[in-house]
Image: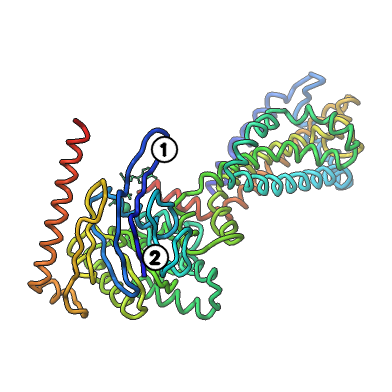
Amino acid sequence: MKRVAYVLGLPVVLFAAWYLLSAGSESFYAPPLSTILESFGKTWTLDRLGTDVVPSLLRLVAGYALAAVIGVAVGVTIGLNRRVRATVEPVLEFFRAIPPPVLVPVIMLFAGIGNGMKIIVIVFGCVWPVLLNTVEGVRAVDSVQIDTAKAYGISGPARLGRVILPAASPQIAAGLRQALSIAIILMVISEMFAASNGLGFTIVQFQRSFAIPEMWSGIILLGLLGFGLSLLFRLAEGRALRWYHGLRDAQRRS
Amino acid sequence: MLEVSSLKKVYRSGAREVEALRDLTFTVDSGELVCLVGPSGCGKTTLLRCIAGLLEPTGGQVRLDGREVSGPPPGLAMVFQEYGRSLFPWMSVRDNVELPLKQKKITRDRRKTLVEQALDAVGLAGTESAYPWQLSGGMQQRVAIARAVAYEPSTLLMDEPFAAVDAQTRADLEDLVRALWQRLEVTVLFITHDIDEAVYLGQRVVMLSSSPTVVQDEITVDLPSTRDQLHTRADPRFTELRTHVYEQIQAAKRGLQLGGAGASS
Ligand SMILES: Nc1ncnc2c1ncn2[C@@H]1O[C@H](COP(=O)(O)OP(=O)(O)OP(=O)(O)O)[C@@H](O)[C@H]1O
Ligand SMILES: [Mg+2]
């Protein structure tokens, strides 16, 4: 209960401040929050959610999942192999340094403007934090743990699945968390360039047709979406890494 | 049979070289229990890692049952000195002990029995579902021992396995090691800092010199094979043997000081 209050406290205060400060606003571009909320209900009907939000979310999930799988698989391969790592790492840093939105027009050239393009954009942006964190996590596995596995004949898939991946999992989770916020940004951006549906597309449409309260309501929805997804992520992480948080608490106490 | 011949290990990191082992030769017969003592930093852990196939020697070789060791040999179990780091914190105590057994393709029922017996033997029945980091240091060390015991190895290497347990538990574990050794006819190489422990446990005690490390001395412990904490330790022969080992270790340490002074001048 207390924790819920902590999580929701600041957002509630901020919203209240926005509400009060914008109450008498005459500005066309910054309408009162009451107007925006009013249009929220009208704009985001079930119908709209089905045609615009669901396709966005599906692309997000597909891109994110793909990036996670590719990032972990390639990251493990690189992390376990010192020679591969030495040759590949500079190249990775180079690709990572490219802001993914820049690539949207390029990707559009060969992937068209359909779902494929948008998913590729998300994958391209998300894969780097997952990959680099996985490399780092796998590389940093305690040598005594590896030696223990070797001494007891824990080899092949069992060593990977029962020792290396779990040992690297806290770092992999950190990469996945970074990737999640990137995924949401890219979901929107990929829809701003060329699309016929989606949350980003709708917001841009509102903006171009000067439906300002509606535009703001879309932005709020986006914020809520991001908040909800990161909450889900935190829950899943807390469950999967229960051992890690317990271990850290135990170490801090001693 | 375990044969270590002219074993040499030099650690190289950049321009720095550390000669951990200079020239070690000794054997441990099949089914024998040998204790190894030596000053801190003389390379005991290094030696054990070479025997376990985790470290490649710079010179010489290790043979186990006639075959040269080039990777971890099957049927070998090791209790690491860094017991806390050698347990997997994402697994319960039960899973930690069971994982190596799964790799040995032991049936489920048999695994269950082995895990239970091993945890029971080290006095940890009832902690199966705890995580290692929820246990005290001494308990963690016993989990590591249980894992080695449940594995039913033919060769058992133990690197100061009782360092973190209290005196009473230590005495119990010493008796456990001897009982297991007698029951399973396993070859045991046991490293310890504790001279009394070495004499109490071993059939033989091998003493290492300080760095540069060679075998300083070796004695056969001619005490009766049924030993118990009270009578064995009160045996005059026990006192004689431990005095001998103690003197050798002191000599080894003086060697260290002399060597150190020589190197710095
Ligand atoms: N990975 C390593 N790299 C470089 N030097 C090392 C490494 N491991 C050990 N050494 C050195 O080798 C020597 C022997 O170390 P080792 O750990 O084998 O000693 P030990 O006899 O087990 O000591 P202790 O009784 O304190 O456990 C030490 O001087 C140590 O500094
Ligand atoms: Mg050591």
Q: Chain of mark 2?
A: B
From the top left corner, tell me how far across and down residue B122 is, in percent: 34, 71
Residue A30 drawn above or below residue A149? above
Disc 2 target residue: B143
Indicate the position of residue B53 as horizontal and vertical percent values: 44, 58
Specify the amino acid type for callout 2.
Val
Residue toward you, B104 or A195: B104
Q: Is residue A30 above or below residue B9?
A: above
The residue that label 1 is drawn on is: B13
Q: Relative to A198, is A228 on the left or the right?
A: left
Counting residues from the start of the chain, the first of labels 2 and 1 encountered is 1
Q: Confirm or reject: label 1 Cβ below 8 Å from ligand 1.
A: yes
Q: Residue at x 89, y 25 (%)?
A: A208
| Three-letter amino acid code at the position of disc 1 | Ser
Q: In what element is the residue under mark 2?
A: helix
- Is residue B123 visible in the rendered image? The answer is no
